[in-house]
Image (cartoon, grey):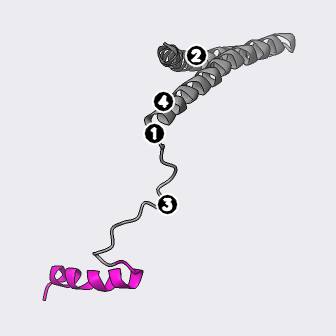
């Protein structure tokens, strides 16, 4: 007898040990929160778009303020060797964040129509 012959015979034994019989339909319990209607789904989408847009715009503004503050502090404390590193990091981070903000704002404005 090969290993493939033993597998189908052992499955009903394992299923009966778990309390599952093939005549029972699978239950919907434990599948998370399901939206009750299409209206709730649209409201949830709009709320998520608004929240995501505000968070990303805040991140963009915050990163700019933090960058400028660090540049000012480094200039004040004469740490001019750190400034090019900060500039390089900001120049890498800004296009990524600006793209995310632009997409989120566009989606948010489309949802407001």
Q: Which residue is mark 4?
A: 42
Distance from disc 2 to disc 3, alpha carbons, whole Å, reads: 41 Å
Q: CA distance from mark 1 to mark 2?
A: 39 Å
Residue bearing mark 3: 30
Q: Is residue 113 left or right of residue 20?
A: right
Q: Is residue 67 above or below residue 16?
A: above
Q: CA distance from mark 4 to mark 3?
A: 23 Å
> In what quadrant of the picture does the N terminus appear?
bottom left
Dominant secondary structure (helix, strand or loop) of the stretch shown in magenta: helix
The residue tagged 2 is 94
Q: Which residues are magenta?
A: 1-20
Q: Are marks 4 and 3 in contact (CB under 8 Å)?
A: no
Q: Earlier in the sequence, mark 2 or mark 4?
A: 4
User: Which residue carries the number 1 mark?
Assistant: 37
Q: Helix, strand or loop at disc 3?
A: loop
For image coordinates 35% across by 84% down, the residue present is 16
């Amino acid at each position: 007898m090969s290993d493939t012959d033993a597998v189908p015979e052992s499955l009903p034994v394992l299923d009966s040990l778990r309390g599952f019989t093939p005549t029972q339909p699978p239950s919907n319990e434990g599948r998370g929160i399901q939206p009750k209607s299409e209206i709730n789904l649209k409201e949830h989408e709009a709320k998520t778009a608004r929240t995501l847009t505000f968070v990303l715009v805040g991140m963009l503004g915050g990163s700019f303020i933090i960058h400028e503050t660090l540049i000012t502090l480094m200039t004040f404390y004469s740490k001019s060797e750190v400034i090019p590193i900060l500039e390089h990091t900001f120049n890498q981070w800004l296009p990524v964040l600006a793209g995310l903000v632009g997409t989120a704002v566009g989606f948010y404005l489309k949802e407001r129509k």
